[in-house]
Amino acid sequence: FMDNGWSLKKLHKQIVLSSTYRQSSNVSPELLSKDPYNRLLARGARFRVDAEIVRDITLAASGLLNTKVGGPSVFPPAPEFLFQAPASYGPKNWYTETGAEKYRRALYTFRFRSVPYPMLQTFDAPNADVSCVRRSRSNTPLQALTSLNEPLFLEAARGLAVRTVSVGGTTDQQRLGYAFRQCLSRVPKPAEIDELLSFLDKQRKRSAEGWINSQDLSGFDSATTKLPDGVTPVELSAWTALSRVLLNLDETITKE
């Protein structure tokens, strides 16, 4: 730390690239007997990542994440009623971003002390009332509902679907492997492949039969959007549904 000029950035890099930090949470009986409480760091910790990282992981997997560094805070989309009485202590201005700015890293999200950003608050981001020395972590149904239905997460699912059918390969199995790696950073197991391909076929059938509005789910608008070559709205809708599943897996937002 001293040799690197007291640089916290270099210290963080050294920690996260260390073999100790990158350990799996799996543990052998031998290590468990030697270090049952993990005081000697015989294994890695398993936990859901912080709120900001949940959002950034989702955007990164979809290819939407804006990696620009620095600059002023941004105002990603949020429910308008939050900034008006009685939800807020007096009206507040929330200048909703458009284009790539709304996909900036969560670090740059503007926050009113009296009106925390909803998605981040749901995933236990600290409020601004007091200093936060340690983050709390909860596991609630509201978190699953947020990652399934919050507009930004749905946009990310659509983005991952477009990315998958565009550059993920030509067969279902190739595309599935590509999307799976973007979300979970590993190759899917045979049983997972079978289950997800079965789900994909069911979604195609439901979209084709009109049980699902393929244009609503895929976000495709023929007036403003061009589909990837050789891809129909039904096909994109099915891959969007599959992308929602992958982005909502526990493993996607969990450090294993």
Image (cartoon, rainbow, N blue to C red):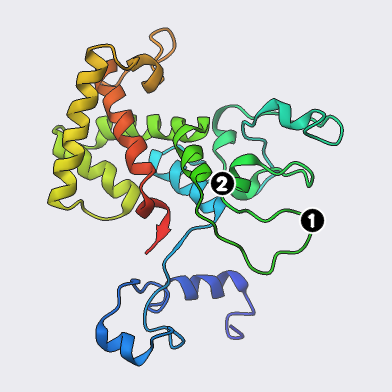
Mark drawn on residue 105: 2
Q: Residue furthest right?
A: 90
Residue 82 sits in which quadrant?
top right
Residue at 24%, 25% (x, y): give it.
Answer: 203
In the image, taking residue 179 as reference, residue 189 lies left or right, namely left
Return the x and y of residue 231 as percentages of the image width and height. Answer: 24, 20
Q: How many marks?
A: 2
* Residue 225, placed above or below residue 68: above
- Identity of the amino acid at label 1? Asp
Residue at 72%, 44% (x, y): give it.
Answer: 111
Secondary structure under tag 1 reads loop
In the image, taking residue 207 as reference, residue 65 lies left or right, namely right
Q: Residue furthest bottom?
A: 34
Q: Label 1 to label 2, Cα distance in Å? A: 23 Å
Mark drawn on residue 129: 1
- Identity of the amino acid at label 2? Arg
Secondary structure under tag 2 reads loop
The foreground one among 27 and 188 is: 27
Return the x and y of residue 155 as percentages of the image width and height. Answer: 45, 30
Q: Are marks 1 and 2 in contact (CB under 8 Å)?
A: no
Check the picture and name the quadrant holding the N terminus.
bottom right
Residue at 38%, 9% (x, y): give it.
Answer: 222
* Residue 117, placed above or below residue 107: above
Return the x and y of residue 74 as percentages of the image width and height. Answer: 67, 39
Q: Earlier in the sequence, mark 1 or mark 2?
A: 2
